[in-house]
Amino acid sequence: MDHGQAISLRRPDGQDAPGVFFAAPTADAPGVVLIQEWWGINDQIRGIGRRLAAAGYRVVIPDLYRGRSTAAADEANHLMNGLDWPGAVRDIAGACAFLKDQVPSARVGLTGYCMGGALTIAGLVHVPEFAAGVCWYGIPPVELADPARLRTPLQAHFAEFDDWCTPAAVRDLEDKLRHSAAEYELYRYPAKHGFFNEARPEVYDPAAATDAWRRTLEFFHRHLGGPAPR
């Protein structure tokens, strides 16, 4: 099984950061930066990287936790709370630059889950080189990134039964998006937070996951020029 290639990313501040790369079937394919959940880069996130690569995208996962991952919620919460969030955005910028340096003419998108969903919106606000992004059940603190400043096309997926990205928080996000200059699509599913994570049967929702994945590939096809979903 392909676990990805370990790579080094050059951030805008000149620092290096680790990452994982998955090659696409064609060397000149569009790129996607994939952001982990609060668990870290685990087998489930690598699996999403493989799926995106198989769908026709070069994929980079920046290693925000610097090699650490966990299956325990308490430790994941500790890791997320200890994260340098502005530094994570610089890691994301470095991942975008890596993909652009490989193929300067190719468009690059951004996607992430939970914590990675929040960082997807932050990355789109702060890194103008991204052509589009897909956020999965994550909202950034406004002091990190104000969604009203967004200008890049965004697709967002949220669960109706979510005690982190609550329905009220999602309504507030959508109000900010309406006042932004960005084209956006926002979808709500009768599911729980983390519904795309097949490694967590207590929240995984196959129907919602299938619909959201199809919409994601269609969105990236339109905005990044990737293959049409089969």
Image (cartoon, rainbow, N blue to C red):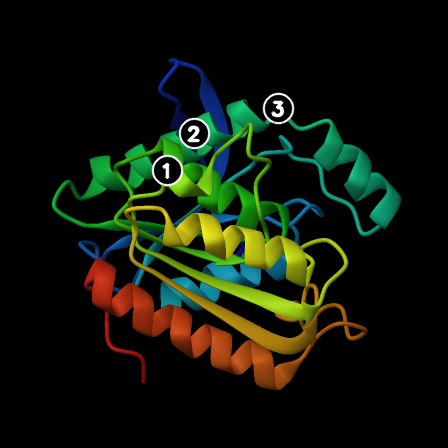
Q: Where is residue 38 in the image (x, y as percent from the top left)?
A: 69, 45
Can residue 224 be seen here? The reply is: yes
Choose top left, top right, bottom left or bottom right for residue 153: bottom left
> Nearer the N terminus, badge 1 or badge 2?
2
| Disc 2, SS | strand
Eye-nearest disc, 1 or 2: 1
Residue located beneath label 1 in the image: 149
Measure how far apart labels 3 and 1 are at the Cα level.
Answer: 21 Å
Q: Give the residue type at disc 2.
A: Ser
| Disc 1, SS | helix
Q: Is 29 on the left-hand or right-hand side of 189?
A: left
Q: Where is residue 150 in the image (x, y as percent from the top left)?
A: 35, 42
Q: Give the residue type at disc 3.
A: Asp
Q: Is residue 186 above or below residue 153?
A: below
* Number of residues whose C-alpha sits closer than 10 Å to that of mark 1, classed few (under 14), some (14–19) or many (20 or more): some
Choose top left, top right, bottom left or bottom right for residue 53: bottom left
Q: Furthest residue to the top?
A: 14
Residue located beneath label 3 in the image: 84
Eye-nearest disc, 3 or 1: 1
> Nearer the N terminus, badge 3 or badge 1?
3
User: Residue at left 67%, top 72%?
Assistant: 198
Q: Quadrant of the C terminus?
A: bottom left
Q: Give the residue type at disc 1.
A: Arg
The numbered mark at residue 8 is: 2
> Nearer the N terminus, badge 2 or badge 3?
2
Which one is in front, 10 or 137? 137
User: Residue at left 63%, top 53%?
Assistant: 169
User: Residue at left 54%, top 54%?
Assistant: 3
